[in-house]
């Protein structure tokens, strides 16, 4: 019975990690990159806005480390370290940069 539960649990964890890496993390990072760039370009550096961006940045770091990097490291695959960094780059860094780029396109298209 314990063996069956651990296999089912392992499959569920793998599916959840895949969902986070392929869907949730890229969407959140794209959105966060857009709003972080908006904060930087706006010039309205009030404490409430600054604290929101600070919390957003900390949340992204935790998301990238806990749910993308560590999930890839725990998989039994060859060269797990390099694949974990590659997953972070593809799921978090590239969408974040695309979000920043999207805001820059919107700003410069309006001028």
Image: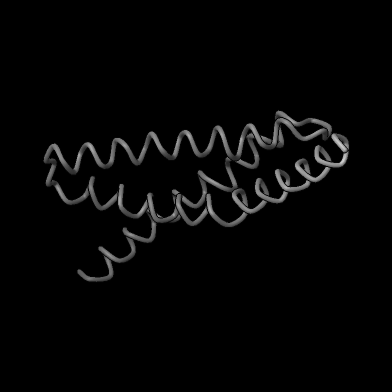
Image quadrant assignment for residue 59: top left
Compare residues 86 and 71 and report the one nearer the observer: 71
Residue at the front extreme, as displayed: 1
33 up-or-down from 52: above or below: below
Residue drawn at point x = 38 percent, y = 50 percent: 33
Please tell me which residue lies in front, 13 or 94.
13
User: Residue 26 versus residue 2: which sits nearer the camera?
Assistant: 2
In x, y percent, where is residue 96? 44, 49
Specify whether 15 is left or right of 55: right
Q: How many marks?
A: 0
Q: Is residue 104 left or right of residue 90?
A: left
Which quadrant: the N terminus?
top right
Please determine whether, in this image, residue 95 is positioned above or below residue 49.
Answer: below
Residue at the spot x=38%, y=34% of the render?
58
| Rendered location of residue 104, percent (x, y) | 31, 58
**Residue 15 x/y as whole percent:** 71, 51
- The residue lying at 80 percent from left, 45 percent from top is 8
Query: For the point 32% across and 37% down, which residue is it?
Result: 55
Where residue 84 sits: x, y (%)? 67, 35
Corner quadrant of residue 71: top right
Horizontal side, residue 67 vs residue 3: left or right: left
């Amino acid at each position: 019975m314990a063996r069956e539960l651990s296999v089912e649990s392992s499959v569920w964890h793998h599916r959840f990690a895949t969902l986070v890496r392929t869907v949730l993390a890229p969407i959140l990072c794209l959105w966060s990159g857009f709003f972080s760039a908006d904060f930087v370009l706006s010039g309205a550096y009030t404490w409430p806005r600054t604290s929101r961006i600070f919390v957003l940045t900390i949340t992204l770091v935790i998301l990238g480390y806990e749910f993308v990097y560590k999930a890839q490291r725990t998989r039994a695959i060859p060269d797990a370290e390099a694949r974990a960094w590659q997953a972070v780059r593809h799921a978090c860094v590239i969408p974040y940069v695309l979000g920043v780029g999207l805001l820059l396109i919107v700003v410069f298209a309006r001028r």
